[in-house]
Amino acid sequence: MENILEVKELSKKYSKVFAADKVSFNIGKGEIFALIGPNGAGKTTTIRMIATLLTPTSGDAVVAGHSVVNEPSKVRECITYLPDEAGAYKTMKGIEYLKFMAGLFTTDSREIEKYIEKAKNINGLGERLNDKIGTYSRGMIRKLLLSRAVMTSPKLAILDEPTSGLDVLNALDIRKTIKRLASEEGMSFLLSSHNMLEIEFVSDRVGIISKGHLMVTGRIDELKERYNAPNLEEVFERVVLENEIH
Amino acid sequence: MKFINLLKKELKELINAQMIISLVVVMFLLMAVGNIMSSTIDEVSKTEYKISLDDRDNTDFTKSIISKMKENGTVATPVDTQGDDYAAILKDNNLDSIIIIPQGFTEAIDSKKKPQLITVSRMESAAMMSNVNNHVSDVTDVIRGCIYEELSQRAGITQEELEYMSSPVNISDNTVVDDKSANISVETIMNSVMMKNQILPIIVFVLIMMVSQTIMSAIANEKIDKTLETLLSAPVSRSSIIRAKMLAAAIVAMINAVFYMVGFSTLMSKGMGSTINTSMNVEEIAGNIGSVGDIVSTESKLSQLGLSLSVTDYLLVGLQLFITIMICLSVSIILGALVNDVKSSQTMIMPLMMLAMIPYMISIFADVNSLPTALKILVYAIPFTHTFSAMSNLMFGHDIIFFAGLAYQIVVLAVCMFFSLRLFNSDKILTISLKFGKKDKTTNSDT
Ligand SMILES: Nc1ncnc2c1ncn2[C@@H]1O[C@H](COP(=O)(O)OP(=O)(O)OP(=O)(O)O)[C@@H](O)[C@H]1O
Ligand SMILES: [Mg+2]
């Protein structure tokens, strides 16, 4: 399978500590890959390096053939990034926000219309898109931002905790959307999450990260078998505890 | 164009109802204050004074003084009061001021002693304009003049002789600037250039503060909402993100500059302008030498001295103002990036505020060029100083200082731009932060 993302020994050092230490993994086309790990494990740090926001201390990540170190602007054309706990411009209307963001990816007005149309279908906000974002609930903002992240059909969509703070129904809705886009359009996803149920449902493969080290990667059923655990939660527990002992 | 898209978004964020309302309110206030000042002054400058007067002496002499006052256009309303409880006198007669000619006034004059003339004024505030309706001292001057005239007549001095004696010399004031001279007094020049020279610093100061605050909170907000991360991971060049932000802030600043300029000019020309004219009018009435011709020719005298500014000069001042704003913007971008919450963005403006405050104060009270050398260099090292002293430097022909200042500001701008661009091109924009009184981020792992 063609790899959309190849992460090679990616490291980031903050003052003295390595927030990410020689992290390596791949994501194939149409694949959904999830990074899981305890708080402060280095998920956001790894993701931000791949999203060209942080400069790696060492190592590299190659997105669709472009290195994040050497050609970050090429990488930006292939990805979209949804930060955790992100907001949007409160004084803008939802529809204006989509238009503004679409305008950053293309200058073709027909293309922009197409993107907006797609985002509308995905977020289901309907008439509320004509209201100021300041009046939206957390779930509505999250849906708006998610639809923005996928409307341009990027080769790789990077979503940091896409469903955190959402109710069950909204979260389910977003998971379904992600799965559909991966299978129907062949979009690849890099996610992070604390919700093991969600990961089991949505992702093809996971990577468990702890204290900056990527401990294991693999298909969920493989991991369950390897660690002889009934569910992902227990796999996670064992892997993280193993790392604590070291 | 993606840049236009960015610019439109920045402008939309900055030009909102709030900004327009505050602009309109400020304009309205400035104009209203100007109008109030000019109408108060108009009232004052009417040469006819009204005053309450209690003639307790009530002799032929005092009566003739009062009728002389009337001839000179001063109407004294007679009131009848007793005793020396002045607060009660004002209160009972519902007055703000009164002049009392005490008993024995005429007797004292006749025996060549100095009699007392009593004035009582109510004071309610120390504001500049609040006591402007109090004519007591003007009226006592008139009374003194009338007595002077009366006594002169008794001594057999004619009206012409009297007029001559009250002003026996004509003074010809001359002022020299560099090697040019003109027949005009320093005060007259000060009065007419003060207005122009003070509008600019006020506007520069207001703009520096406003522009810095605007862009700083714009950057801080983008950081807090993480919209900055979204922007920086999008396929647009980082320099175009900065340029859009700076241009939008500069455009808004310029719109504000124009509005403030109009507002302050109205305030100055209506308010301050009529103060100056009033003082001239009073002098004329008092029979001094100041004539209308003098005022009209002030402008031509100024250009004779090389003190009037040409169109090129104004363009240069405008250019410098623009560079000043750009310096503010690029410094504020750096400061804004250091901020992680809205509260500390208010603290971050302090360094800029100080840098603007020092030259602003100096420009109002002193001439930078006349400071001791060490201090002068220090003050000139603040880039904003050159903007505050631009007008006066151009006016008094210190062209070298002006252009050196301009060059210095351009260098400062280049350095600041370089650093803010570098900041945006590195990941420092997302990772640096100054936290005030909070724990370092590396020590707590729960983000
Ligand atoms: N700007 C920074 N400066 C210094 N240290 C940082 C900075 N950002 C993150 N870190 C540290 O790097 C480590 C990894 O943080 P990161 O945000 O990647 O964790 P995470 O896995 O995303 O955690 P969470 O699940 O809570 O989001 C943490 O110990 C954190 O304190
Ligand atoms: Mg995180």
Image: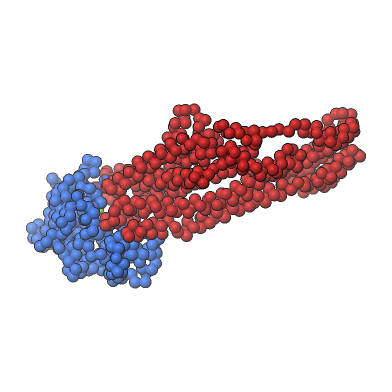
Which quadrant would residue B436 be assigned to in this image?
top left
| Chain given the colour blue | A
Point out residue B251 in the picture as x, y percentages from the top left corner: 43, 53
> How many discs mark residues in the rendered view?
0
- Residue B260 can be seen, yes or no: yes
Q: Nearer the viewer, residue B437 or A68?
A: A68
Q: In percent of the image, x 79 and y 45: which residue is there?
A: B51
Q: Is residue A48 left or right of residue B310?
A: left
Specify the farthest residue to the right. Answer: B60
Question: Is the image coloured rainbow, by chain, by secondary structure, or in one colour?
Answer: by chain
Chain B's colour is red
Is B272 on the left or on the right of B428, as rendered?
A: right
Where the C terminus of chain A falls, by quadrant?
top left
| Left or right of B387, for residue A5 | left
Q: Describe residue B216's horizontal placement relative to residue B107 as left or right.
A: left
Q: Position of residue B406 (x, y in %)?
A: 43, 40
The answer to whether residue A23 is above or below residue B279 is: below
Residue B374: x and y in percent read 45, 28
- Give the percent coordinates (x, y) of residue A183: 17, 68
Quadrant of the frame with the N terminus of chain A? bottom left
Snapshot quadrant of residue A74: bottom left
Which residue corresponds to the image point at 9% horizontal and 61% vertical from the top-left? A222
Residue nearer the viewer, B263 or B305: B305
| Observer-nearest of A245 and B132 | B132
Which residue sits at x=21%, y=68%? A181
- Residue A212 appears anywhere in the view: no
| Residue occupying the point 83% across, 38% down | B146
